[in-house]
């Protein structure tokens, strides 16, 4: 699971190329935001990222962070996960291989997993239904070990 994190250069290159197609520039603020993202936990919310700028100079506004996040998602640099009830998480997709998620509905913990059998099974199901699958996002909801233990007490 401990894969080397993607280098900041690889991310900035991809972001720069994407921004170019939108006739936007890789501003120092956008660079700053990418640096922050690299220091974030694997799955983070927009507000986690906004909070990481508190007390920092120059100040990066919430609107700038939000706008950068949607650009990064649009450019395929970030993946967006909707875990329901407005619980939206971002995750870097560059340099990371495909995986799915277990989501604790009690504490919000996200656990990653990868199952070859499940991947094959999903492709088989799609094929059987004459469906051409391009991607998928598997989410299993429930309680993590700690929350489950606490709930049983
Ligand atoms: Zn939990
Ligand atoms: Zn993940």
Image (spheres, grey):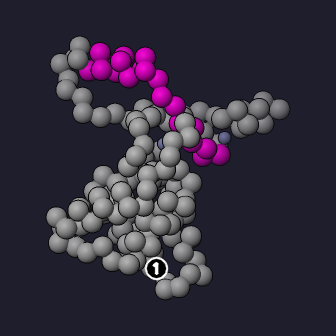
Residue at point 77% right, 32% down? 149
Above or below: residue 103 compared with residue 19: above
Residue at point 44% right, 52% down? 6
Above or below: residue 59 compared with residue 62: below
Give the magenta part as a residue range: 107-126
Where residue 33 sits, quadrant-wise, is bottom left
Above or below: residue 24 compared with residue 81: below
Q: Which residue is mark 1?
A: 60
Ligand 1's quadrant = top right
Badge 1, how many Cα within 10 Å: few under 14, some, many 20+?
some
Q: Nearer the viewer, residue 137 or 77?
A: 77
Q: Is residue 85 magenta?
A: no
Q: Is residue 116 magenta?
A: yes
Per the image, label 1 sits on a secondary structure element best described as: loop
Where residue 7 sits, quadrant-wise, is bottom left
Residue at point 70% right, 32% down? 145
In the image, farthest residue toward the bottom: 58
Quarter of the image with the C terminus in it: top right
Picture coordinates of residue 99 (x, y %)? Answer: 44, 34
Picture coordinates of residue 94 (x, y %)? Answer: 38, 49
Where residue 55 sits, quadrant-wise, is bottom right
Q: Nearer the viewer, residue 53 or 97?
A: 97
Quarter of the image with the N terminus in it: top right
Above or below: residue 13 compared with residue 109: below
In this picture, residue 58 sits left or right of residue 71: right
Q: Nearer the viewer, residue 117 or 87?
A: 117
Residue 63 at least partly seen: no
Residue at point 48% right, 28% down? 114
Picture coordinates of residue 132 (x, y %)? Answer: 19, 26
């Amino acid at each position: 699971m401990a894969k080397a994190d993607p280098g900041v250069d690889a991310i900035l290159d991809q972001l720069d190329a994407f921004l170019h197609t939108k006739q936007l520039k890789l501003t120092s603020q956008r660079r700053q935001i990418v640096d922050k993202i690299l220091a974030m936990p694997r799955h983070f919310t927009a507000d986690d990222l906004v909070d990481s700028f508190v007390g920092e100079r120059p100040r990066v506004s919430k609107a700038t962070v939000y706008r950068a996040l949607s650009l990064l998602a649009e450019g395929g640099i970030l993946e967006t996960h909707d875990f329901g009830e407005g619980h939206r998480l971002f995750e870097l997709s560059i340099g990371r291989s495909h995986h799915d998620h277990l989501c604790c509905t009690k504490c919000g913990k996200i656990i990653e997993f990868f199952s070859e059998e499940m991947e094959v099974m999903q492709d088989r199901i799609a094929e059987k239904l004459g469906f051409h699958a391009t991607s998928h996002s598997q989410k299993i909801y429930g309680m993590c070990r700690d929350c489950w233990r606490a709930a049983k007490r």
